[in-house]
Every structure is written in structure tokens, then in C-alpha cells.
């Protein structure tokens, strides 16, 4: 009986972190003017949303991954796929507003540029 109870508790412990990542995304503040004195001067990284990470981490991911994205040649499809510090990043640059999503181990950060 105890073995069954211990097994059930272990299974429950494995499920609880997965349920936490299914939570609604947290709205984080924008990164104000990340590219001063460039052609993007005054353009913010905005509408940053975080699931499974703090807002500070989400803003760092958005700033760093987006800086790398700007250094990449735009693909003909208009959708960028690349890695940044263990995060898998997808950027849709086909519209007038660029949309990015970074994912890592069930965590998610999204932002607009």
C-alpha cells in the first residue's frame, strides 16, 4: 500500500510543474529604445508576454534574441528560426509588426517589434 502511495505522489509531483506552465502568460513591461543611435532609434520591444519565467528574464530574452535576429539575413519565407542561449526562437517578419516567440523547456516568451 505504501509503495502505491509513494508512486502516486511521485506521479503527482511530475504533473504539477507541467500544469504550472499551462498558466496564462504574464504581461511584462516593454524594453524601451534598445537600439539608440541606429535606424531603430526610439522603437521599443513591446507587448512582452512570459510563461514560466520572470518578467526580468523575459525582457532579457527578448532583448538578446532580438538583437541576434536583426543580425541575421531575412529568409525568403519571412519567418526566421534560430537558437539563442538554449532558446528556440521564431520570428515572423512578414507584416509591418514583427512577432517573435522564444521557447525553452516549456517556458515561453513572446514580443512585438
Image: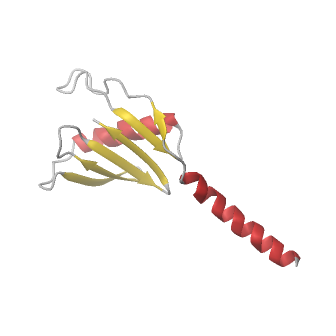
Q: Which residue is located at x 71 percent, y 65 percent?
A: 12
Q: Viewer-proximal residue, 33 or 83?
A: 33
Quarter that holds the N terminus: bottom right
Looking at the image, residue 52 sits to the left or right of residue 61; the answer is right
Q: Which residue is located at x 48 percent, y 43 percent?
A: 25
Is 16 above or below relative to 38? below
Looking at the image, residue 46 sits to the left or right of residue 3; the answer is left
Numbered-mark total: 0
**What is the image's colouring?**
secondary structure
Residue 86 visible in this rendered orientation of the protein:
no
Image coords of residue 4 (percent x, y)? 81, 77
Is 70 above or below relative to 21? above
Residue 11 visible in this rendered orientation of the protein:
yes
Q: Which residue is located at x 60 percent, y 52 percent?
A: 20
Looking at the image, residue 86 sits to the left or right of residue 39; the answer is right
Q: Residue furthest left?
A: 76
Quarter that holds the C terminus: top left
Occupied quadrant, residue 60: top left
Q: Which residue is located at x 19 percent, y 25 percent?
A: 38
Image coords of residue 56 (percent x, y)? 50, 34
Image coords of residue 7 (percent x, y)? 76, 74
Is 31 above or below relative to 92? above
Q: Residue furthest right?
A: 1
Is 89 above or below relative to 28? below
Amino acid at each position: 500500500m505504501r509503495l502505491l502511495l509513494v508512486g502516486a505522489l511521485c506521479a503527482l509531483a511530475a504533473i504539477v510543474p507541467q500544469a504550472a506552465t499551462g498558466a496564462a502568460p504574464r504581461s511584462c513591461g516593454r524594453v524601451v529604445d534598445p537600439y539608440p543611435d541606429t535606424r531603430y532609434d526610439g522603437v521599443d520591444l513591446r507587448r512582452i508576454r512570459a510563461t514560466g519565467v520572470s518578467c526580468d528574464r523575459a525582457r532579457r530574452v527578448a532583448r538578446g534574441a532580438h538583437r541576434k535576429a536583426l543580425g541575421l539575413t531575412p529568409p525568403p519565407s519571412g519567418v526566421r528560426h534560430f537558437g539563442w542561449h538554449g532558446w528556440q526562437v521564431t520570428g515572423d517578419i512578414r507584416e509591418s509588426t514583427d512577432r517573435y516567440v522564444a521557447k525553452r523547456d516549456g517556458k515561453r516568451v513572446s514580443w512585438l517589434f
